Image (cartoon, rainbow, N blue to C red):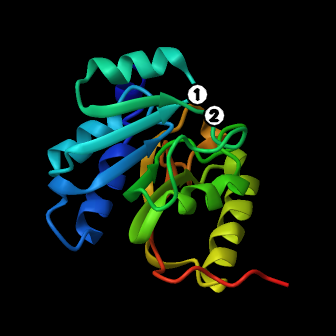
């Protein structure tokens, strides 16, 4: 499979980071896997004790493949950025977006929607690449993340830069000639009190 050839480590790194941040055994925690794809993140989360997994994705084909894993309790179609998440406010103990925060994918403007469905005190686990073609998106994403932190919406728990995120498909995308693309895992915790509107 393509992701195996690319040594794509984001699902493993994200799941490990989220499990480390989680204050209690995660078996009863309700988690939303946004842009769940084929279920790579669910496999890693399941290995770390997460059992109540819900997923959304914009592709019917990806949802079918995710369904075939048997790891999700609920799967729904959703294109984040074009429509709201199919969940009530403050519904999830954790929300993940792994491998979909990038140029031409989930817009950084959709981050508040992730917060909306996260319970106060809940965790958000986000990843993005640090390769050349994603740098402008990463700058915009980090500005959005920092703005929400200044507004009191959440607190940063972790921002871990990873040099060997996945194999580069071209030398110009490679980080300092390593043959790999770098990436980042972010973990945020939603604050218990909603922020005041900026005026």
**Circle 2 sits on which residue?**
79
Judging depth in this view, the residue of 179 and 51 nearest the camera is 51
Using the rendered image of the protein, determine whether residue 170 is visible from the camera's viewpoint: yes
Expressed as whole percent of the image width and height from the top left, the position of residue 128 reads 55, 52
Q: Is residue 160 toward the left or the right of residue 108 in the image? A: left
Q: Which residue is mark 1?
A: 58
Q: Position of residue 85 (x, y in %)?
A: 57, 44
- Mark 2 vs mark 1: which is more N-terminal? 1
Tell me the residue at 50%/51% (across/down): 88
Q: Is residue 149 above or below residue 11?
A: below
Query: Would you call the spot at circle 1 few (<14 residues within 10 Å), some (14-19), or many (20 or more)?
Result: some
Placement of the N terminus among the 4 image quadrants: top left
- SS type, badge 2: loop
Q: Could you give the CA–CA distance between mark 2 and mark 1, rounded to whole angstroms?
A: 5 Å
Residue located farthest toward the right when viewing the structure as drawn:
199
Closer to the camera, 161 or 99?
99
Residue 110 vertical placement versus 70 (above, below): below
Against 134, is 43 above or below?
above
Residue located 49% across and 56% down the image: 126
Q: Position of residue 18 (x, y in %)?
A: 31, 61
Percent coordinates x, y for residue 198 in the rendering: 79, 82
- Residue appearing at x 63%, y 82% in the figure: 195
Q: Quadrant of residue 65?
A: top left
Say if mark 2 contacts mark 1, CB within 8 Å.
yes
Q: Residue at x 43, y 59 (%)?
A: 162
- The C terminus lies in quadrant: bottom right
């Amino acid at each position: 499979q393509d992701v195996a050839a690319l040594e794509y480590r984001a699902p493993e790194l994200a799941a490990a980071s989220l499990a480390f941040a989680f204050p209690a055994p995660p078996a009863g925690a309700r988690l939303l896997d946004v842009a769940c794809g084929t279920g790579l993140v669910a496999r890693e989360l399941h290995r770390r004790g997460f059992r109540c997994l819900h997923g959304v994705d914009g592709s019917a084909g990806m949802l079918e493949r995710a369904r075939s894993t048997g790891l999700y309790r609920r799967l729904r179609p959703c294109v984040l950025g074009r429509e709201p998440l199919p969940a009530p406010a403050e519904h999830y103990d954790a929300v993940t977006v792994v491998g979909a925060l990038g140029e031409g994918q989930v817009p950084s403007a959709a981050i508040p929607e992730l917060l909306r469905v996260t319970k106060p005190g809940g965790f958000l686990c986000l990843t993005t690449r640090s390769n050349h073609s994603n740098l402008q998106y990463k700058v915009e994403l980090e500005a959005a993340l920092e703005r929400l932190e200044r507004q009191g919406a959440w607190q940063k728990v972790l921002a871990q830069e990873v040099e060997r995120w996945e194999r580069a498909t071209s030398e110009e995308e490679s980080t300092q000639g390593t043959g790999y693309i770098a990436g980042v895992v972010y973990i945020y915790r939603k604050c218990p009190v909603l922020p005041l509107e900026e005026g």
